[in-house]
Image (spheres, grey):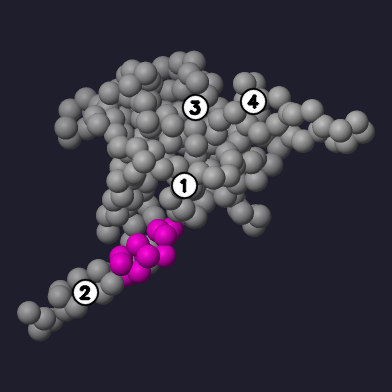
Amino acid sequence: MIFSRKRAAGRHARDERATEAPETAEGAAPAPAEPARGPYDVTEAPDGVQRLDLGSLQIPAVPDVEVRVQADQQGVIQQVVLVHGQSALQLGVFAAPRSEGIWDEVREEIRQSLFKDGAAAQEVSGEYGTELHARVRTEDGLTDLRFVGVDGPRWMVRAVYQGEAATNPAAAGPLVQCLDGLVVDRGGEAKPVREPLPLRLPREEAEQAGQAGAEADATSAPGAR
């Protein structure tokens, strides 16, 4: 089942551009500074922002960005892709240890995997730190990919740009706004490191997916017309 919605109108180490905490009364503990950009942990996320709640990921509504979700009949999501013009951004979120981030290790594993498949990859400094840029061969020909990782408190977001935004970060535009405004709800339960955090369709869409699946099963059943 493919669910597509056209959008209408914290990082592990806080961004160095985070705003300073406001002054407080003498003797009072200063309020923690809110990160200047995300992805945010759910405990740090700004209020008053419209978001699509997919469980562990909450995606901000950004004009002209289409959210494409591939899910099963139970509403469990296998893939989330944001599309704007000729560019796309695939999102994934994974469990990480409390003590340290895992993007450096994951990035090296991605690089080695690409190398084994005959694709060259290079590390490049980007907005979120070290990125991995690669050109891979697909059924449609050569495709450029740009891997971005963000370590948060016990989670890691992996974002993969495709299309024009893979080779020209300035072209990412609204997709960057989505990544900057992303919210991660890790939950408190223990999970193996690197296990994908659960993603689910909102209730209304999940019910529609289940109904569509039931109708498809009925149509394909023996004797169905």
Q: Main secondary structure of the magenta part?
A: helix
The amino acid type found where label 3 is placed reads Glu
Point out the stretch of residues depicted in magenta: 200-210
Of labels 4 and 2, the one closer to you: 4
Return the x and y of residue 170 as percentages of the image width and height: 37, 18
Label 1 CA crowd tier, 10 Å (few <14, some 14–19, many 20+)? few
Return the x and y of residue 161 as percentages of the image width and height: 36, 30
Q: Marks 1/3: CA distance?
A: 35 Å
Q: Which quadrant, please, contains the N terminus?
A: bottom left
Label 2 CA crowd tier, 10 Å (few <14, some 14–19, many 20+)? few
Is 100 placed above or below 172 here? Answer: below
Q: Residue at x 28, y 72 (%)?
A: 211
User: Is residue 120 covered in magenta?
Assistant: no
Indicate the secondary structure of the residue bearing disc 3: helix
Q: Marks 3/4: CA distance?
A: 29 Å
Q: Residue at x 30, y 37 (%)?
A: 64
Who comes first in sequence, dot 2 or dot 3? 3
Is 138 placed above or below 81 here? Answer: above
Of labels 1 and 3, the one closer to you: 1
The answer to whether residue 119 is seen in the rendering is no
**Residue found at the very far right of the displayed protein:** 27
Who comes first in sequence, dot 1 or dot 3? 1
Q: What residue is shown with label 1? A: 50
Who comes first in sequence, dot 1 or dot 4? 4
Q: What residue is shown with label 4? A: 18
Q: Marks 1/4: CA distance?
A: 22 Å
Who comes first in sequence, dot 3 or dot 4? 4
Q: What residue is shown with label 3? A: 108
